[in-house]
Structure formats: C-alpha cells, structure tokens
Amino acid sequence: MSSRVLLHVGTPKTGTSYLQDVLFRNRKVLAQAGIRYPADRFDAHFLAALDLMRMPWGGLEAEAIGAWDRLAEEVRSHRHTSIISHEILATASRTQVGRALTSLGHDDGTEIHIVLSVRDLVRQIPAEWQENVKHRSGIAYQAFLDQIRDPARESRIATWFWGVQEIPDILDRWGHDLPPERIHLVTVPPAGGAPELLWKRFSQVFGLDGLDLDLEPDRANPSLGAPETALIRRINRNANRDLAPADYRPLVRELLAHQTLSRRRRSPRLGLPPDAYPWVNEIQQAWVDDVTARGYDVVGDLAELHGASPGGWSDPDQPSEKQVAGAAVDAITALLLENARMRRTEERLSAELAETRGALARSYLRPTYRFREKVVRRLQGGRVGRGMLRAYRAARGRSSRSA
Amino acid sequence: MQTEIEAGERRAWGWVAALRAGATTPWRDYAGTADRGGRYLPGAQQLELLRRLNATGRPGPALVERVLTASAPGRGRPDLQLVGAAEESAFGPRPVDPADLPPAELVRVATGLIAEDLVAAGPPPPLPPGRPRPWRRAYRLVGDPWLADPIRAELRRRGRPPGGRLPTILVLGTDLGSMLADAWTARSFAEGGSGWREWLGGFVAHDRMPPRADLVTHARTWAQRVGRQRVEIVIGPERLPGLVGVRRALPAPPAYSADAVDLARRVSAPLGLLVLPDPRAQLLRETLGPRLADAPGGPLAVPPAHVEWVQGRATRMRDALLRAGYAVHGDPDALVPDAPAEGSTPDDAGVLALAVRLLLDHGDRRAEEEVSG
C-alpha cells in the first residue's frame, strides 16, 4: 500500500500538460527516488479520470474502461509515494471523489494529498473558450461569456467551466475529508515572469527537488491568438459536419492549432472584454478570501489570482480580417505540405504494393506452382482426393487452402 | 441551541432515512429529522430518483444504496445540494428543491445504473447458426439496418448465411419516414448520439440523408463493386422470402415506443464507458431490448414540421433509383410517405417513468454482483 499519494486534480491550463509530460518521461528517475508515476502511456491518467467520472470523450472512453481501478491498483501496490495528475479530475462529484479516495487507500491509512494548480480567471476564461474551440465547438466568445455569467449555470458549458475552475468548490469536493495541511495550492505566476518559476513550485510540492529530471518538453498545449482562434472556429462551423472526430484531432487540433497557428506569436492575444473585469475581480477576491481562511498550504502567492488589469482588447468575434487571412494562408500552407507528405507516402506504398503484386504474379507463373495448382484442382474433384487433401493439411498443421 | 442550518441538515438526513425506508414525501413537505448518516448528503438528483422509485414500487435495499451512491455519468449538472439543507455557499451550483429538477436530470442518474445492470446481466447466449444449405441462394442484404439485421440473423439461423458465389445484392427499404425512424432507432441501440428532433433536424437543415437510410448510396456503392445488374431494390420486407429462397415468413424488427428508443439511446452513453462498442450494441439490442418490448407509448414518427421535407427527399430517392436502372421489387412509390405517420416523439417524463420501471424490475442486485466501473 502506498504510504503517500499526491493527487493533482486540476485546474486546466495551469501547466498540467508540461508537468504530466515531465513525470511520464522521467518515470525511471522518479522510481529510483521511490516515487511512482503509474502510467504506461502519456494519457493514462486522463483515461483513468474518464473512467472514474464515467465521462464520454469523442470515443476515447472505449480505451478508458477499467482504467481507474487499474491505476488505483498500481498505486496501492507501491510502498512509497505515488503521483496521479489530471486536470479534468477537478470536476469530479463528491461521490466520485469518495470512490477515488477509497480506492487509493484513504480509509486504510494512506496519506493522501490534494494538489490544485490555479491561475487567474483573466487568463482562464479565454483559455477555456479556446479549448472549447479546439474541441470542435463553434460557439462565439460572447455567447460563451454569456453562458458562464448566467447565475443559473445550467448549460453544459457553464457546468463544465465552473466545475473545473471554481477553486473553493473544487476544494470542497476533493478536500472535505482531508485536513487543510494536506491540501496544496500552486499558483501560476503572472504572464511575463520567469518561465521556470512554475516548475519550481510544482517541484517543491511534489517533492522533486534535487532529482535529475529531463525538463525538455515533448508535449505542450500551446495557446492561440484571437484571429487564429477565430479561424479555427470558422473551420469548425464549416467542416464539423463532414470531418470525423478521429480526423479532427490530428488535422485541426494538432496540425493546424498546435503545430501551425500557435507559432504566430505576433497576433493579438485572447483576453477578457473590459466590461468583464469588475465581475471577475469580485469573484477572484471572494475566492482568495475563502481559500485564505481555510488555511491550506499555498505554494506561490494567492495575490497572483488577481489577474492583470486590462490591456489592449481584441474581440475574437470581430477579428481583423487581414489577420485571419494571414492565419488562413499559414493553415493552407501547412495542409498543402501535409498533403504533399501524404502523397509521397501514398506513392511509396503504391510502389511497394505493385512490387509485391508483381512478385506474387511471378510466383504464380512458376512451373512448380502451376503443377501444384493443377494437382490440387484435380484432387478437389473427387471424394478420395478431397480426403487426401484434408489429411495432407492436417499433417501440415495449418490451412494451405489459400496456397 | 441548534442553528437553522444544523436543523436543515438534520432534516435532510431525516429525509434520507425516510426515503431509505420507502417514503414518498417530497422534500418541501418533509418535517422529520435524523442524525448524520454518512460522510456527505447524497445529491438532490439521487434523492429525488429514489423518491420516484418509492412512489412507483418497492425498491430493495441494494437498489436503494446504489441510487444513493450513484453519480450522474457524463457531462452535465453536478450532484446538487438540497435547498435549505446546508448553509448557502457563495460557491458551487445553487441548491435546489428536488421536485423542481427536470426529468432529464433524473434520467441521467438512472441510465448509469441501468447500464451497470445490463453489464451484470450480460447478453443472452447466441443462437447457433443453422447448417449451411448447399442449394441456398447467394445474396447479400443491405439497406435499412433495423429491418435487415433480424432478417439476416434469422436466415443465418436457417442455414442461409449471406454471401456465396456471385451474390445478388438486395437493398432493403420501406417508406422514408419509417426508414428515418429505423435509422435513429438502430443508432440509439448502438452508439447513441443526439435526440430524435435534434438528429433529424440536423439532416433537414442541411438537406442531407443519414447514411443508414440512404438507399441510393447503398445501391450505388454496391453497383460500383459488383455491377448494376446484380443490385436489386426491395421495397417492403414482405417481398424478401421469395428473393432469398425461403417459404416461411421472415421476422419483423422489434417495435418499441418512442420513449423506449430514447431510453436505449441515453443508456448507450454510460454503457460505452463500461464495455466496448460491439458488446454495447449487443447488450442494448439483446438484453435491454426485450425489457423494453412492452413499454407503453406510441411508436416513433417524423414530426409534422418535417413531413414535407421527407416527402421531397423520398421522391428524389425514388427517381434516382429508377433512373439508375436497378431491378425493383415492390412499388417504388411506396418509398414516399403519403401522410404523416401516426406516432410520437420521445418525452422526458415518459423516458423517466420507463427508467424507473426498469430499475425496479432489474436493478435490485446485491452489492457483490455489481460491476466495478
């Protein structure tokens, strides 16, 4: 049974992809230090979270069946510290939290710590809208804002947004059965700060200081600018009907959004409209007051939850068409290059297939083959012959009918 | 002296205890109290579902515990708190009076439990295929899947599996209104997806045909593969026996109410989190299907607003099939529905009533029988 489990439950867009990538690639180094990151694929904890919360995810859920129980079993079988990390765990219900903690040994004395990395809403709100767009949504930014500002919070978007972002509520669900010193908040430094500062905070809270870890990122979830997000949204609205989810992920989300459009760093960034700042500031102040009063372990500074004041505002619902056209040219170029690469692959495979067919045809023309074919045909014409063939095939140990 | 909140929490625990004992009193009318009976109060959705179960029948203790510890699967509103039971927090979703919850919220919780029941029950044993008859006709049966699948299975059982040397491709269809309902039904008993009105409305809005009901594409695809002469259109399943060389009638697909189909669709989503796609379809068709056979309510029908579109598309389909020159068995005009079919569209309250009945009939399994997620 694990003596200690560090359970990182969110929130999205707080450097979680980077953290999970580092933990996954450095499993051996971690294991030597007695820390288990139980994963046989980079998204193992994502699948486990889908399974725990019984959440469909564009067909991926079929790969998630039984994943949480397998993960919990691996954690329980380890004697020292284990780390679990996925940001969608933030939205788990109390019942699901209860099941998760029980399966990890909470009732049997395992020391469970909850880690929640948090970032100001000024950055989280546009980032969540962008994630929606990168998951095929065609919703306009203003409509997204209207939904999350609706006090009823009954829409799917609002339910999800607040489920993974409302820090006091997440901690109520995950932490109600744990002492406050076992709940750790990692704040994301403001934009423009030292890039390694967030990692230092993660390293501190997960006890990774002093380990020789490879920190070069393999995977990241880079952000897009306002015109680039507007372009993806338009593509969604136009192509969703015909583009299957299995094709959308590699072509739109990966090739266009992550590998191409995220490189355009000079376009205006997504932000909050100026009239949303007072509303956001009020919420964040209430969160900071509440979290401060609860006495959790804070790694970083809760003051960082107050987002930066409004700078330039670029409305992604009414983007500069010139900038969108620039992004579209980059997107077309990327698709052309990808298409060219696939054509070369297709040509190579066609050549290989033609060569194989030729070799097969040549083997058919060999006199020995033609003789054997003639013998088999003659034997199949009579009962005795068929019996001999059956005996031959049984003796040979496999079917030769196709030969 | 206890505070108002403490009194509210004691009242909530009292309601939980009363519901466990079979009470049907709504939360707003309940006045009893009890001590805390667990780590946390079950959600309003779970408690209201249990109250509905109590109002309809007598759920056993295992089912009661399963309901109280269930979480609604998938995305949607989280487990909600009872209004008046706890201090009004500035955070999290607002507490609710459970009686005000829409039926769809209760159906979400119920479908997760029904999916577990299906996995626990497993599929019925497969019927052995009949010994292949050497003189059977070579055929392949495609087209409306809801009509074709049980016929194909029956023919296999009678020793007449599809395939053979140079088979005739039989493209089976019926009036387009029924084929659309069949397509959504087949989808609901497999991968699930969106509701009837949303699904059909999407095709109407874009003037497109769902692949399962698109006879023209079925026929064209096969014609490109085997040649037009070997593709034949069959309008109405009653014409099939002669074409596949059998005398006895072939089975009709099961007829379900609109609410029953919609419940299968909703169960499909959580079931997909427990088993792989093929067993999911098998469990829905072969284990859930028989349980829904006598569900009350009218069959699925195209809403009147879309009838004109259906007639227009059916006319185009008929003309395209005739123009392509396929052999046609039956009256091609029968593809075009001449009037709105009698029937209904799914209704959340009806679906909930059906889900409650299924849970009462099949959900009272002992804890050790339960399926782990």
Image (spheres, grey):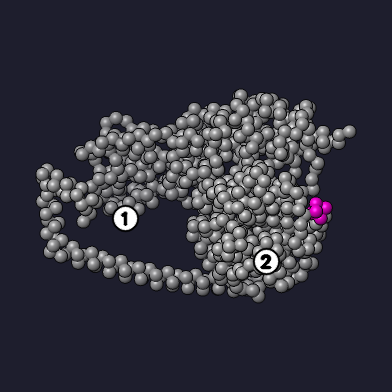
Where's residue A100, x and y in %?
A: 63, 46
The chain to which mark 2 is attached is A
Where's residue B292, x and y in %?
A: 50, 31
Pointer 1: what residue?
B224
The answer to whether any part of residue B222 appears in the image is yes
Seen in the picture, residue A101 relative to B101 is either above or below; the reply is below
Seen in the picture, residue A167 relative to A262 is either above or below; the reply is above
Q: Residues within 10 Å of mark 1 (few under 14, many from 20)?
A: few
Find the magenta span and give its range.
A290-295
Of residues A153 and A216, the one drawn nearer to the viewer in this rendering: A216
Q: Residue at x 63, y 30 (%)?
A: B64
The answer to whether any part of residue A17 appears in the image is no
Counting labels gives 2
- Residue B261 horizontal side relative to residue A122, left or right: left
Q: Is residue A47 magenta?
A: no
- Residue A243 horizontal side relative to residue A275, left or right: left
Pointer 2: what residue?
A209
- Amino acid on which disc 2 is placed: Asp
